[in-house]
Image (cartoon, grey):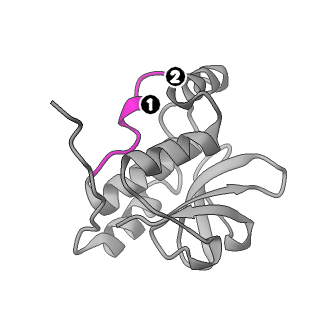
Amino acid sequence: MGKTEVRLIRRPDWEARLVSFVESRSTAQFRWGEHDCCLFACDAIEAITGVDPGEWFRGRYSDRHGAVVSLRRFCDGGLEEAMVRIAHDLNAPEVAPAYARRGDAVFLRQTNGIPSFGICMGAEVAVAALPAGVAMLPGALTLRAWRVG
């Protein structure tokens, strides 16, 4: 039997769900495998669409080393390559960063060079922050973006 095709469709109340999700994580402690940039973005996509793009990663790592090993196993690469594979698996088309809209998935490098996976919130991108909470970074840092629904 072939793989079932998944298509991301935003729920009718996706905007309220996105805002509520981001607010709910505003004080969450950064924890590898729970509240890190990859799973934060995946959880946001799940809130918007009901589809969990981070399912494969859950329970597979609990520290930075484990995250790196998991990424290599998943896509033979790093965070950017994982996002490319996730987007492909979910039929999420890549769009130019300038055309990312609220709720879209983005890949960026923070000003300190750290790669991050986040969610477009308009002019800013929400990412899991160290040591806790959610950071709002300038959307201009976005290098790649994928349409969510």
Q: Looking at the image, can residue 29 be seen? A: no
Which disc, if any, is residue 120? none
Report if the CB atoms under discs 1 and 2 are less than 8 Å apart: yes
Residue under the image location 60 percent in, 41 percent down: 81
Q: How many residues crowd around disc 1 within 10 Å: few (fewer than 14), some, or many (20 or more)?
A: some
Residue at 53% in and 72% down: 121
Label 1: element kind: helix
Q: Mark 2 falls on what kind of element? A: loop
Residue 3, can we see it?
yes
Q: Which amino acid does label 2 sit on?
A: Tyr
Q: Splitting the image into 4 quarters, where does residue 49 fall?
A: bottom left
Q: Is residue 55 magenta?
A: yes
Taken as a whole, is the magenta stretch helix, strand or loop? loop
- Residue 64 percent coordinates (x, y): 65, 26
Taking 20 as reference, is 134 above or below it? Answer: above
Query: Eyeballing the image, is 43 above or below 14?
Result: above
Front-most of residues 70 and 5: 5
Left or right: residue 112 compared with residue 87: right
Identify residue for label 1. Answer: 57
The N terminus - image quarter? top left
Reply yes or no: does residue 70 show up in magenta: no
In this view, the residue farthest toward the front is: 2
The residue mark sitting in front, 1 or 2, is: 1
The residue carrying mark 2 is 61
Near-viewer residue (28 or 69): 69
Question: Dot 2, crowdedness within 10 Å: few (<14), some or many (≥20)?
Answer: some
The residue positioned 76% from the left and 46% from the top of the image is 114
**Magenta residues?**
51-60
Percent across and percent down for residue 3 are: 24, 37
Amino acid found under the numbered disc labelled 1: Phe
